[in-house]
Image (spheres, rainbow, N blue to C red):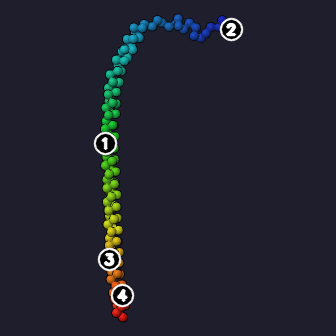
């Protein structure tokens, strides 16, 4: 195999028929005109879908914040009921202390009288 060996691509350019530039341009325009309307409709549908998704996301964020507010209200209600519970315990302790104070006062008085 020497430099005189023929390349496999040799003569390929000569074997191709001449391509008409105008025909290629017309074929390209025909192909584009065939698919372009569908692509434009798809593009507008995708844009509308994207806008609707943005609106939906904003609505979901608002609903989530409402649920968070509701949860904080539930927490506040639980806190108030717990405060009522401890308030009643304090009232009971105060009443018991007052009763014990009265009993000790009576005992002191009866102890002095003895």
Disc 3 and disc 1: Cα gap in Å? 54 Å
Q: Secondary structure at mark 1?
A: helix
The residue shown at (33%, 24%) is 40
- As drawn, the residue found furthest toward the front would be 112
- Nearest the viewer among 11 and 101 is 101
Per the image, the residue denoted by label 2 is 2
Q: Are marks 4 and 1 in contact (CB under 8 Å)?
A: no
Instruction: Please report whichever mark, 3 or 1, sits nearer to the chain's N-terminal start.
Output: 1
Q: Residues within 10 Å of mark 2 (few under 14, many from 20)?
A: few
Per the image, the residue denoted by label 3 is 95
Instruction: Please report whichever mark, 4 or 1, sits nearer to the chain's N-terminal start.
Output: 1
Instruction: Please report whichever mark, 3 or 2, sits nearer to the chain's N-terminal start.
Output: 2
Residue 82 x/y as whole percent? 34, 64
Is 58 placed above or below 73 here?
A: above
Residue 9 x/y as whole percent? 57, 10
Is 28 placed above or below 50 here?
A: above
Per the image, the residue denoted by label 4 is 108
The residue shown at (32%, 77%) is 95
Disc 4 and disc 1: Cα gap in Å? 73 Å
């Amino acid at each position: 195999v020497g430099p005189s060996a023929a390349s496999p691509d040799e003569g390929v350019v000569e074997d191709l028929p001449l391509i008409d530039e105008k025909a290629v341009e017309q074929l390209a325009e025909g192909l584009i005109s065939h698919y372009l309307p569908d692509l434009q409709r798809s593009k507008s549908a995708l844009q509308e879908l994207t806008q609707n998704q943005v609106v939906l996301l904003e609505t979901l964020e608002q609903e989530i914040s409402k649920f968070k507010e509701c949860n904080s209200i539930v927490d506040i209600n639980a806190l108030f009921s717990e405060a009522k519970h401890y308030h009643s315990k304090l009232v009971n302790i105060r009443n018991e202390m007052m009763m014990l104070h009265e009993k000790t006062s009576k005992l002191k008085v009866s102890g002095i009288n003895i």
